[in-house]
Structures are given as structure tokens and as C-alpha cells.
Amino acid sequence: MKVVKFGGSSLASAEQIKKVFQIIKSDADRRLVVVSAPGKRFKDDEKVTDMLIALGEQALNNQDYSAQFQHVLERYAQMVTDLQIEEPVLEDIKENLHTLITSDMSQPSYFMDALKASGEDNNAKLIAAYFRKEGLPAVYVNPKDAGLFVSDEPGNANVLPISYENLKKLRNYKEIVVFPGFFGYTLDGKLVTFSRGGSDITGAIVAKGVRALLYENFTDVDGICVANPNIVKNAIQLEHLTYREMRELSYAGFSVVHDEALQPAFSEGIPVRVKNTNNPTAAGTLITKSVPKSVHTVSGIASMPSFTTVYIEKYLMNREVGFWSRALKICDELDISYEYMPSGIDDITILIRDNQLSPEKSAILLQRLKYELNADEVRFKDPICLVMIVGEGMVESVGTLARAANAFANANVNVQMVNQGSSEVSIIFGIAPQDEHRAVRALYKEFFEQ
Ligand code: ASP
């Protein structure tokens, strides 16, 4: 049994849904279909999820939302017409949207989550109806009925372990199951969503629940490139990589699959294949626990453009027990998550993602670090870009760092920081943001063109 997940661009129009139908029909093992909300049909189009967010905000702000309501409905209406679905799907969608938008707003985050999730929920109903119309027995299954339970964190839920046992029952359906991605229910019955892009998470959870043979994640690219194709034109594609490599690369900005999504599939050892709805016969990229020895030492190059750097200096810092933990406690208390902390003998630099800081928080952070740590100097340094090389092939191999350093030197890129975990699966370089593209291209040339 294969679990197949389709992203928003694969389901954005009737034309795309027809392709999805052919993909499901062509392989009898594809029995569980997890779907996103309709995404963008063209570059400047809107995703239905974003349209629903705008709709919800208008309602919360007491504005007239009737035009936006109609706007959302038209996306589905167009598909229902083009797919010639005879079942009263559109009427159901309209009624559902009306119920949601007029529901209790006293807890805005739950109100918004229910509205956002309707993007996938209604799309799943529509797709199941279309499959039936085409003569393929299919059934829509709601996450509540399937027992997909999640933590009570609106917009950022986590799956509860009990779900896996419940989802096993999805194996028993004779029909193709069409399952909406992106949300689950708390134990007391409230609908909450995962983080944005979270249909990938549902796909992996369902794959683990039914112990799938394979989790296929269909998107709009032929597979995962070794470097960002917007930076390196015609970058080669990865045929096969490991869970660990994928985790590192998606953390560092490879956005083909959701950052944390694949963990459930990984923990169960389920192979994942990223494929293209618009070119389904292409092999795509396979992700498994281990790979046969690769010809490349490095499997991918990623970059994360902008981090705030907080520099702290104190003479004899190395002798002061608990200095680091006090610095990090201040971050904790301000609810600031930090990413890296390269250090010298008497100095540390804390790297923080820009989205963690507001001007007010930054000012408080600086002040508290200076006074509570009695530091000689605390200041923000210029922002830093992190470039990362990833590859299981680097483990216990000699000379990778030298090759990277050489590539940077030849491209005239100054390296301000280097970080390698003892797993040796990735090395991170801190450079000036304006050098990002030059640095990535230099590494690509060194590791993939030589
Ligand atoms: N529709 C949701 C979003 O746009 C989830 C997803 O597509 O995976 O974030």
C-alpha cells in the first residue's frame, strides 16, 4: 500500500486534478491519497489557504466579507464545473463555509484554524466525488473519524502517538481513501492545524499509521536539486538521499518538502519519493535510511540568508561557570529561539533567525545580556548568511573542509564562522549575506562540476 500526497499546485485546477486521477489509476497500490488545498494556478495566483485567512481576518475585524466569501467559493465552483461533477459538492462547500464563517469567534485561533483547514477538507470531498464520477470507488475520510489526534496548539499542532494506532484502520477500506491534509483534532474535539505547508506532515503520519510500503510526495518539480535552482542554473538532481541528509537540507531552506514533515515516515523506515505531478514518469528523488555509496562526497548545498548575530565579550569568560547558560536563559525568558552559538575564549556569538526578534525584543535582549552578565561588550554585529554542505559521504572522509575553504578563497568569499557537528553530516559556514550566491556557486563548482 502506497500513501500518495499531492501539494497545492498539483490540485489547483480541474486540469491538475485530472492528472492526479491518472496517477492514482495507474498504480493499484496507490490507495491512500492525502490532499492539500488548491494552490496557485499561475505565478501571481492566490492559494486558497491564503484566501481563507483573508476571509477569516475580515470576519474577525467585523468587515463585510461577502466578496471574499464569493471569491473562495468561485475557486471550487470553477473546478466543479470543469470536472463536470454531478454530486452536490458545491452546495456542501458553500454550506460548510457559511457555517464556519458564522461560527464562534471568541477564540480567534481556533476559529481561524477551522476556516484554514476547510481548504483541504473541501478539496478532499471534491476530489473523492470526481474519482467516483470517473468510476473509481473513492471515499472521503475526515481526520476526526480516522482518529488523527494532535496537541492543542492552534496553527502549530503536533501529532499525538495514539493517532498511529487509530490510522491503521485506514487499511481496511476497499475504496481509495481521500484524506485532507494539514489538520487534526485535539482530544477534546477541537480542530487545529499543523504549521503552514503541513499537508506533508499529514501524509507522513498516515504513511506511518498504515505502515505504507512507500510514501510518494507529489509536487511540481521533477525532484530535489543539489542546490537552489534559483542560484545555480541547471543544478543536477538528487536521485537518492538519506533521511538525515534530507532533514539537514530542508532545515536549511530546501523547501520541496516541509521541514519537519517526514519525521513520522523516517521513524518507521518508510521510503519517501518526491515526484512531479506534471511529469509522473520521471523517477524523482528517493529518500531512505541509507544509500549505496554515492559518487559525491557532498549531496547538497543549502543557504539561509539572514541571521541576526549578537556578540558578547567578557574578559576571562572561559573561567566563569554558567556564563553560557545564563545568556541562553535570557533568550529563553524572552521566548527567543537561537540557532547556533560559535565561541572564542572570551566571546560568544548567538545566531538568531530574524523572525524571532522585534525591535523591542532586540533592545531588551541587548540590555539584559549586558547588565545581567556583566559583559564588557554586547552588540549586534552585521547579519550573517549560513551556507551549508550536507552529505553522508563526508563522514570520515578527508579533505572536504579544505575543498570548501579553497572554493571560497577562489571566489573571494570571506568565511566568518565554521560549524560542524560530530555527526559530520553537514558543515555550516557563516558569510556576508551579499556573498551568498557567489558562495553557493563556488561550492557547486567544486563538488559537482569537477
Ligand atoms: N494549505 C496549507 C498551506 O498552504 C497546507 C499545505 O498546503 O500543505 O500551508
Image (cartoon, rainbow, N blue to C red):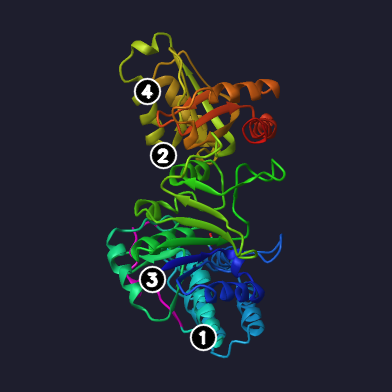
**Which residue is identified by label 4?**
324
Q: Amino acid at mark 1?
A: Arg
Residue 78 pos. (x, y %): 66, 79
Q: Amino acid at mark 3?
A: Pro
* Secondary structure under the numbered disc 4 in the rendered image: helix
Between circles 4 and 2, the one closer to the viewer is 4
Screen quadrant of the N terminus = bottom left
* Secondary structure under the numbered disc 2 in the rendered image: loop
The residue located at (50%, 43%) in the rendering is 251
Q: Amino acid at mark 2?
A: Asp
First along the sequence among labels 4 and 2: 4
Mark 4 neighbour class, 10 Å CA radius: few under 14, some 14 to 19, many 20 or more: some
Q: Please indicate, yes or no, whether residue 243 appears anywhere in the rendered image.
A: yes
Q: Amino acid at mark 4?
A: Trp
Confirm whether the magenta stretch covers residue 168. no
Q: Is residue 76 left or right of residue 150?
A: right
Residue placed most toward the observer, 323 or 140: 140
Residue placed most toward the observer, 9 or 321: 9
The magenta segment is: 138-153
The residue located at (48%, 59%) in the rendering is 200
Counting every numbered tag in the picture gives 4
The span from disc 1 to disc 4 (Cα, nearest Å) is 61 Å
Residue extending farthest to the top is 316
**Which residue is identified by label 3?**
143
**Which residue is identified by label 2?**
335
